[in-house]
Amino acid sequence: MLQLAVCDDNIEELANMVQLINQYRLTKNLSCEYAAFSNGFDLLSVLEKGKRFDIYCLDIIMPAFMGIEVAKEIRAFDKTAPILFFTLSPEFALESYSVKAINYVLKPISKEKFFFTLDEVLERIKREKEEDALIVKSNEGIQKILISNLAFAEVIGRKVLYHLCSGKVIECTESFSSACDKLLKYGCFIKPHRSYIVNMQYVDTIKNHELTLQTLSTVPIAQGKVKEIKQQYLNYQMEGE
């Protein structure tokens, strides 16, 4: 189910966005849920608790916490989810690229403009999901794991366990080295330990010989690899700027 976050300090504008989302959902027969926030602090608070959204719709000009700053904080939790800016002012358009916003829409927001924007975003999400996926054979049959949903994988005995951001674990009987070869083709994965491979998108902190993920899982870093892993993560962060 698609999850949307909407953040606007103007209650009337926020209500309008919610109404447009409901119209879009019904018109497109889309399975969708949304959460509405009147300030960036409340939105970031739910992200800190582990909640994630597929699309973020933000106003830019908000008191105390500007939309651009909210977007930067969102990127600390989620590097890939589409961010859309809806605003009265065109002056922040260039700055929006710094957080990899994929659209910048000027208010007032008409139904046609909103529908067109969401159509484009959902098509992009669909394309990315089709391209970036791992096909595995598990106890439940053939399964497709979206790279963007995979937090980390580990090997225990002869089984490879794929840990998804939702908390679900997919267990497979396969070669861990083969699984790592497939995942390392994506620039977001690192191998901190012979028994683990981690999606850097979900790394929260690196401390001593341990990675803490946004899912609250911890992954060990092998002796002698701490410096290398920190550098790889730093490079990944720099590329995302």
Image (cartoon, rainbow, N blue to C red):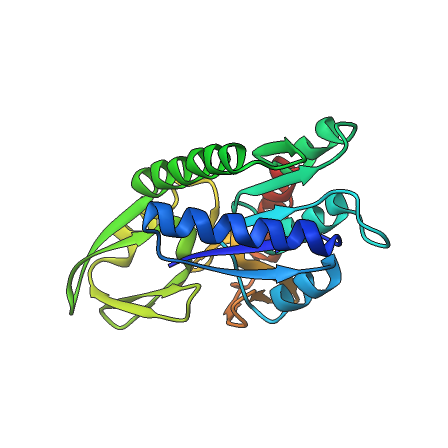
Residue 237 location in percent, x, y?
Answer: 63, 44
- Residue 76 in sight from this viewpoint: no
Q: Is residue 173 left or right of residue 13?
A: left
Which residue occupies the foreground of this view, 174 or 30? 30
Q: Is residue 84 left or right of residue 127?
A: right
Which corner quadrant of the image does residue 138 belong to? Answer: bottom left
Residue 85 location in percent, x, y?
Answer: 65, 39
- Residue 218 in sight from this viewpoint: yes
Residue 59 location in percent, x, y?
Answer: 70, 45
Which residue occupies the foreground of this view, 158 or 64? 64
Q: Is residue 10 left or right of residue 29?
A: right
Which corner quadrant of the image does residue 167 belong to? Answer: bottom left
- Residue at the image point whose x is 68% and y is 67% from the top: 45
Q: Is residue 209 above or below residue 179?
A: below
Which residue occupies the foreground of this view, 185 or 47? 47
Tell me the quadrant of the picture where the C terminus can be found. top right
Q: Is residue 63 above or below residue 92?
A: below
Q: Is residue 89 above or below residue 168?
A: above
- Residue at the image point whose x is 22% and y is 65% from the top: 172
- Residue at the image point whose x is 62% and y is 68% from the top: 46
Residue 74 location in percent, x, y?
Answer: 64, 52
Which residue occupies the foreground of this view, 124 or 210? 124
